[in-house]
Image (cartoon, rainbow, N blue to C red):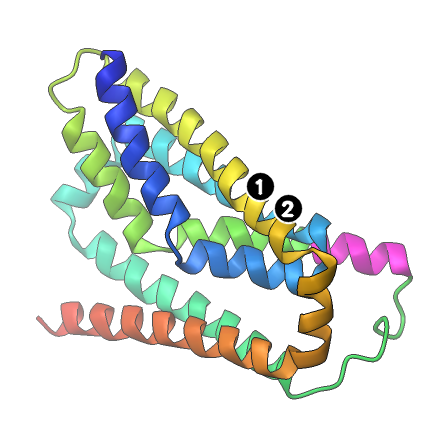
Amino acid sequence: MNGVEIATVMFGIALTQISPGPNMMAVSSAALSGGRRPGLLSAAGIATGVFIWSVLFAFGIGAVIDAFPQTLTAMKLLGGAYFLYLALKSLRACLKHRNGLQQGFSAGQTAQRSGLDAYRTGLLVVLTNPKAALMWVAVSMFLATTHGAHAALVLIGGMAAMSALVIYGTYAVLFSTGVAVRAYQRFFRTIDGLFGAVFGVIGGRLLIDGLRDLRN
């Protein structure tokens, strides 16, 4: 695989990562509500998920998806359920006041839990999103006739994970600035409601698509 092919694939992946979507929503939500550290950990979770997908496709999960299309249907249902969970979580947050730390937790314990939750959310948003799988289907097909395609997938996966960390890490920094945080503290009900609505639309669409696949 030559440098031009790698650059072509990475350009397409970077465009996908830069564009607004569930990944950016997860990072911005974590950064606005928890600060820079949760935002960066959410970006790290996304980067981890990106690399996991590349490894799975390098070891042949693409053939499994081709042989069993029901795999994507299951992913749609699972992903839809998870995005609806995120929607309910955001909507619940916008319905209650946030007066300091939750009772029973120290500041360190709360920050640690927030960071772990952010990392896990970023990871699961990628792993349960069928569009992430379809992107790697396209990449693997592009590399199908390339010598050493499996190694190339892992290489590109590592590069894509690094670009995800840089791109979504930048979003985390931007959304954790003082201006952004003050705006969130003032309008957190509206912002959390917006996050909930967006996650709800994504989750509902995935569930509807999955149920439609089951019916057909």
Q: Quadrant of residue 181?
A: bottom right
For mark 1, give the secondary structure. helix
Determine crowd level at label 2: few under 14, some 14-19, many 20+ residues with C-alpha closer than 10 A: many
Along the line of sight, which residue is nearer the eye, 212 or 161?
A: 161
Along the line of sight, which residue is nearer the eye, 56 or 121?
A: 121
Give the x, y percent position of residue 68: 16, 48
- The dominant secondary structure in magenta is helix
Asked if one can make out residue 59 in the rendered structure from this viewpoint, the answer is no
What residue range appears in magenta?
Answer: 107-115
Residue found at x 87% / y 54%? 108
Find disc 2 in the rendering and name its residue: 41
Give residue 44's mark.
Answer: 1
Relative height, residue 149 to residue 20 (above, below) = above
Asked if one can make out residue 97 in the rendered structure from this viewpoint, the answer is yes
Residue found at x 48% / y 53%? 124
Give the x, y percent position of residue 200: 41, 76
- In the displayed structure image, the side of residue 123 where residue 76 appears, left or right: left
Along the line of sight, which residue is nearer the eye, 93 or 61?
A: 93
Give the x, y percent position of residue 75: 31, 57
